[in-house]
Image (cartoon, coloured by chain):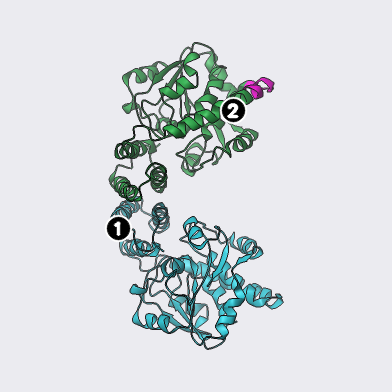
Chain colours: A cyan, B green
Amino acid sequence: MTTQYECIPCFVRQASEALAILVENGVERERLMRQLLGEISVNDWRGSPPVMAQHLHRIIRQATKNKDPYSSVKNEMNRIAEGMMSRMREMIRKSENPRELAVRLAIAGNLLDSGAKTQISKEELPQHMDKLLAQPLRGNAMTLFQKAEHTSKILYLADNAGEIYFDRLLIEMLPPGKVTFAVRGGPVVNDATMEDAKRAGIAEIARVISNGSDAPGTILDDTSSEFRLCFGQADMIIAKGQGNYETLSGRSRKICFMLTVKCPVIARHIGEPVGSMVIKM
Amino acid sequence: MTTQYECIPCFVRQASEALAILVENGVERERLMRQLLGEISVNDWRGSPPVMAQHLHRIIRQATKNKDPYSSVKNEMNRIAEGMMSRMREMIRKSENPRELAVRLAIAGNLLDSGAKTQISKEELPQHMDKLLAQPLRGNAMTLFQKAEHTSKILYLADNAGEIYFDRLLIEMLPPGKVTFAVRGGPVVNDATMEDAKRAGIAEIARVISNGSDAPGTILDDTSSEFRLCFGQADMIIAKGQGNYETLSGRSRKICFMLTVKCPVIARHIGEPVGSMVIKM
């Protein structure tokens, strides 16, 4: 999916919000904001949105001399998700359709995103989750499990910290021994890295690999050869979140996208309204 | 009021929305968007927000070779407001406090704004008006009339096309012969110009002057000497809308600001929440 005209003001908004959080000094914040505006004005707009986001966040990390500026945000999201685990396990245990609920929860966990416009505070999250879980799932969750039964290698592309706890619940329901869980190769926004996957205990139930890239999505040309090998060999790929959808949509028929739709550009592209929970194969 | 850090992404959003409306050709729109991003990145951020907006809209008018790109928007807003006049006159006639209602209506008319984030479609307007009119007025409308009685020269600074019909209703209640109505000196966004004031019949009930400037606010240094003379000689100035507030707040104790608060920066500055109707002396 290529960057759309409407993505441009959204890049600027995300950049300004990132600097508002990360740079306390007003003069330095202004200097950096001017730099990012300049970058957006001259950069290529033909790539997928995560290409630009990767570029901007590299500049931010370099300028702030902070290799992982969202570290505390990620820790907080992990902590919140961790705290919801027993309640969610109980929900699944009591559910008439535990598999579908696990898919719904994994998609609802995608709300833990600090990049998208739909920013949700940690206080609001449980309420939003309930609201989201009450609405219809767009797409068929059961197809995911049917396909998973008939494959030998499943590659699961993670999105955000916190969210990966929800992913864990779903992975626990997939056939054991088949899943490889891929995280970003380095910190970018609040996206999950190896550290988060370990903390969430994913390494105990799946093989965890890094994709070797610091893009907030999966830009194949930017990933490691180990990751690309996994990608090529997988019979089935589960791709979480907008960033993975933006970078991989239309790339392979074996991908199953799972996301909450957070912006009108994605909504138009995927054919489902903003706010909806989508599973799309 | 100086430009705040949060105004920067808002400038970008406004610029992108303006180009989306005004420039059909995608290549040309991208070229212009890149130019405007570049301008915002290097321009002075110390002025009031309308200084930047004036600069960006001059570039847009020049690039599109269109001296009045919002002409049709303004005509539509005038038409809508014109169509509401008899209903509003009836409301005022039946009101227990017609003077306060006229102030409320003049402030509610400030919703007819295509620059602010709170974009309201023409279909939604009557409903928004009712909602706005039902909420408390922040400030005392009666003080306006008391002051108007004891002054000889009132300068009324207009904001948007359409809105000026609502202003007309208020001016009809002010002491006759005292009001000078000032409009923008040239087209900028949907701000009212001489043409709109004539169409709304303001010239029949007040002296109408141009402020000589194409800024979407009142940047005194940019206005004509005729306007500045009026400004200096007035005993009382009624300033409508955010643009006039942004440029004149803190400049004179004789100004009475009347506006709907449409953004968090103004809300913080004026001390009233977003969405409120404010009259502030």
Asked whether residue B141 appears in the rendered view, the answer is: yes
Residue annotated with mark 2: B84
Pick whichever, B252 or A81, lies toward us: A81
How many neighbours does mark 1 have within 10 angstroms: few (below 14), some (14-19), or many (20 or more)?
A: few
The amino acid type, in three-letter code, at marker 1 is Asn
Q: What element carries label 1?
A: loop
Q: Is residue B273 left or right of residue A21?
A: right
**A82 relative to B75, above or below:** below
Q: What residue type is labelled 2?
A: Met
Residue B120, given in percent of the width and then of the height, sits at 53, 40
Q: In the rendered image, which residue does mark 1 sit on?
A: A43
Label 2 environment density (alpha carbons within 10 Å; few <14, some 14–19, many ≥20) = some
Q: In this view, does B206 lie to the left or right of A278?
A: left
| Magenta run includes residue B112 | no
**Residue beneath the point at 51% across and 59% down:** A267
Q: In this view, does B41 lie above or below B134?
A: below
Question: How many marks can you see?
Answer: 2
Tell me, yes or no, whether the two marked residues, 1 and 2, touch with CB atoms within 8 Å.
no
Q: Mark 1 lies on which chain?
A: A
**In the image, which residues are magenta?**
B89-98
Residue B100 seen in the current view: no
Image: B263 above or below A199: above
